[in-house]
Amino acid sequence: MTIDLLNRQSSNFVLWAPAQDAPQLIIGTFQPGAPPILKDKGTFKLSAAAGVSGLFEISPATCGLQNGTVYHYWFEVDDTHVGHQPGSRIAVCDPSALTTDWRLTEGDQPAAVTKFENAKLVPCDPDGTVVAAAALPDARRLPQNNQMVIYELPTAWARRPRGGGVERGVGTFRDIVAMLDVVAQGANFAELEASQRGRAHILELGINAIELLPPADSLFDREWGYGTSHLNAPDYELGFPEGNSWPTANADLCRLVETAHAKGIRIIVDVVMGFSRNGPYQHIDFDDFHIAFDPKRPPNDPDAFTSRPGEARQDFGSRLFRYVKRITTYDPIGGQNATFTPARHLQLVSLARWMRDFHVDGYRIDSVETVANWDFIQTFMENGRSDFRALCAAQGMSQAEADARYLVVGEELQEPLDIIRQGRINALWREKFREYIRAALLGQNADGESLESTVRKAVDCREFQYKDLAEAVIYLGTHDVEGFHKERLATMFRYLFPIDDSMSDAQKDRQNQAIERRMKLGFVCLLTAVGIPMILAGDEFADEHDLFNIHGSVSNQNGKQVDPVNFSRLEGGENQWRRNVLTHVKRLIELRTTHPALALNETKFLHVDFTAGRRILVWQRGDDNDPVIVVANFSDFETDHPFDASSEYVVPNWPHRGDFLWREVSQKRDVPTACIGREPLFPWEAKVYARR
C-alpha cells in the first residue's frame, strides 16, 4: 500500500496535526557527553501544507541542513493532553518517526532521527546507517499456517552472574539473531551457552515462527513491550546492546528478519492497538486520537465501550485510542482531505511501514476488546494481507498460497468466534486449551466437565466450534502469567513438587523428575492437538519464575511482564532434567512441523480407560493411511514391572496393528511388530507413534 505521509517524509519534515495551528521544528545534531546535548540547535516554524487541512511541513533547505549529516529533532506544539495546562507548549517526538533516540529527550519524548543526503531526508539509525528494507523472503519457503509452531519470545532475559542470584537484562535483536545463526555472536547475552558461536538455541529447537512481543518503541525500559509509544520505530533498547556507542535498531531488526526468513522461519509481530503509553498524539491532538474517562463513572462516549453492550474499555494505565469518532482532515494514506477516524489511519500507516520494511508474516493483536472495533480489526487484517499477497504475487504465487502463509491472530480470552466467522480476523488465542489441559495435567476436571471431556475438548478445538486448526492458537502458557494457573507451567508443578535445602540430592531429583514427566505429557498434548501450537520461550526447558510478590505469586509489579526468560537454566549438571524436557520437545516439534497428519483437522479417540484409578486416553490424528497415535496417561497408574519385556498396556483398537511398521517418536525408538499397541506405560506419560 502506498502511504502519502511516508512518501512526503523524504522531501520535508512533516507533521499531521489536526488540532494545531503553529507547530515548530526543533533540530540539531547529537553531541556525545555526560549528558549528551543537542548541538547547533535551531527552531523553525512549520507551514500549513497546500490543499489540505491539518498537515504542516518545512523543507530541509529552509533549515540550512548540511549534506551527509545526521539530525535529531522534535516538534514543538500546543499541549492538548487532558489535564495539562491549556496553551502550554511541549516538544514531542515525530509521531511518524522511523527511528527514536532516547539518549536525547525532552521530558518523556525522545528525539527523532533523520539524515540529510543529496537534498533528501533519509531515514537512518543514529550512527548514520540508512534505513533500508529487509531483503524479500522466499515466500514459498515459509511454513503454512497449519504447519506452524510459534515461539513467543519476550525480550526480558536473565543470566546467572558468577556471584550468584539472577541478573536481568535485555535480549536485543542481535541476541535473537545469535539464537538463530550458529556463526552469529550474541550481544548482551554473549556468554550464554545457548547463543555461543556454533550454537543457535531457537534454530535447534525447530520452531518455524517467532512471535516478537511488541518490538515497536516503548517508553519503558524494556520489559515485555506492552507500552508502545512510537508505532513506526523499532524499540531503541532492542537495538542498543550494552557497550555499543550507537543504537542501530532498524539495521538490527532487518538482520533478524532476514536471518529468520533465510531459515524458513516466519516473523509474527505483536501489536498493541488499544492504547498507547506517552505517545506523541496525547499532546498533539488528544481528543481526536484518544479518550480519557473516569472508570468510576458511567461513560457516555461511544469510544468508551467494548463490542459488548455496556462494557467499558480498560486502559491498563495508558491512554485509549479512539476508533469511532470521525473528523475531516488530511488523510495520511490517500493524501487528500477526507472524513475518517484518525487513530485507525495512524495504525494503518504503521502497518504499511512494518510490512514494507520488515516483510512481517503475521500479527497478534493484543486485547481485541480493548481495540473494541471489529470493523477496524478487519481493515487492519485485510490491508496487511493485501500487502503480503502482493509480495507473493511478485514471486508467482496465488492468493491462496499467500493466504496460507499469513495470519492475524486476536487475543480475547472469551474467544468470540463470531469475529472469525464474520471474516474480521483469521484466528484467536485459544485460552480454553491452556485452562483445560492444565487441569488435566493436575488430574482435575475443567468447567465441571469429566476428565475425559476435559482432555477431548482440549485436544480438538472443533469441540468448541472452531472449524479449522488454523483458527486456534493453542498454548500451555503465555507471557500473561498473572492469575490462577497462568504462571509458567513448571512453576505450577513446582507448587506440587517443591524442593528445599533440607532435601537430599536424591529427593530433589525425584521432585524434578515428577515435573519432567508432566512437562513432557503437556507438550505431547500441545504438539499433537488440533490448533497452531505456541510455546512461551523458556517453557521448552521448564523455565521457572524468578520474580514473585510477597505472597509467592506472580504479580504485575513483581513478575507479570518483568520476569525474564532464564536461558542459563539450560546449563549445569543440576539442570539435566530440564535438558531432557528440551530434547523431548525438539522431537515433538520436528514431528509437528513435518508429519502431514498433524496439519489436518481429523481427530478421533480410539480408547478411553478410567478403570481402577486409570485415566488413559488414546487419540489418533490424521487419516488411517498415515496417522499419528498418542497414548496418554493422566494418572499414577503404572503397568506391572514396566521394565520387563513382558510388561504391557493393551490398546484394543489400534489401527493397522500388523500392517505398518511403527516408531515411538519421543524416544526415537522403533517398535517391534509384536509390541504394537501393547507397550508398558508409566505414570503421567504419553507415548507418540507414527509410521516408519
Image: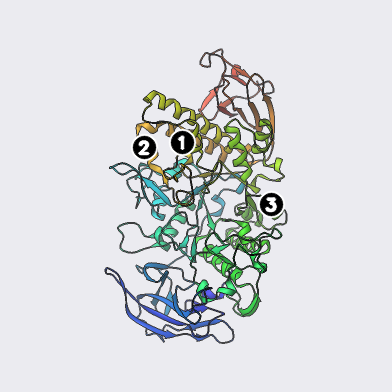
Looking at the picture, tell me which residue is in the foreground, 282 or 580. Answer: 282
Residue 624 in view in this figure:
no
Location of residue 210 with respect to 659 vertically, above or below? below
> In 3D space, how far apart are the residues under numbered discs 3 and 2 (Cα atoms)?
42 Å
Q: Position of residue 183 (x, y in %)?
A: 36, 48
Q: Quadrant of residue 118?
A: bottom left
Q: Callout 3: 10 Å neighbours few (<14), some, many (20+)?
A: some
Q: Secondary structure at mark 2?
A: loop
Residue 665 in view in this figure:
yes
Q: Secondary structure at mark 1?
A: helix
Say what amino acid the circle numbered 2 marks.
Glu
Q: Callout 1: 10 Å neighbours few (<14), some, many (20+)?
A: many
Q: Callout 2: 10 Å neighbours few (<14), some, many (20+)?
A: some
Q: Is residue 25 left or right of residue 637?
A: left
Q: Position of residue 584 (x, y in %)?
A: 49, 33
Residue, disc 2: 571
Say what amino acid the circle numbered 3 marks.
Pro
Tell me which numbered mark, 2 or 1, is placed earlier along the sequence: 2
Q: Position of residue 29 (x, y in %)?
A: 33, 76
Residue, disc 3: 416
Say what amino acid the circle numbered 1 marks.
Leu
Tell me which numbered mark, 3 or 2, is placed earlier along the sequence: 3
> In 3D space, how far apart are the residues under numbered discs 2 and 1 (Cα atoms)?
12 Å
Q: Which mark is residue 10?
A: none
Quarter of the image containing the C terminus? top right
Residue, disc 1: 582
Looking at the picture, tell me which residue is in the foreground, 613 or 571. Answer: 613
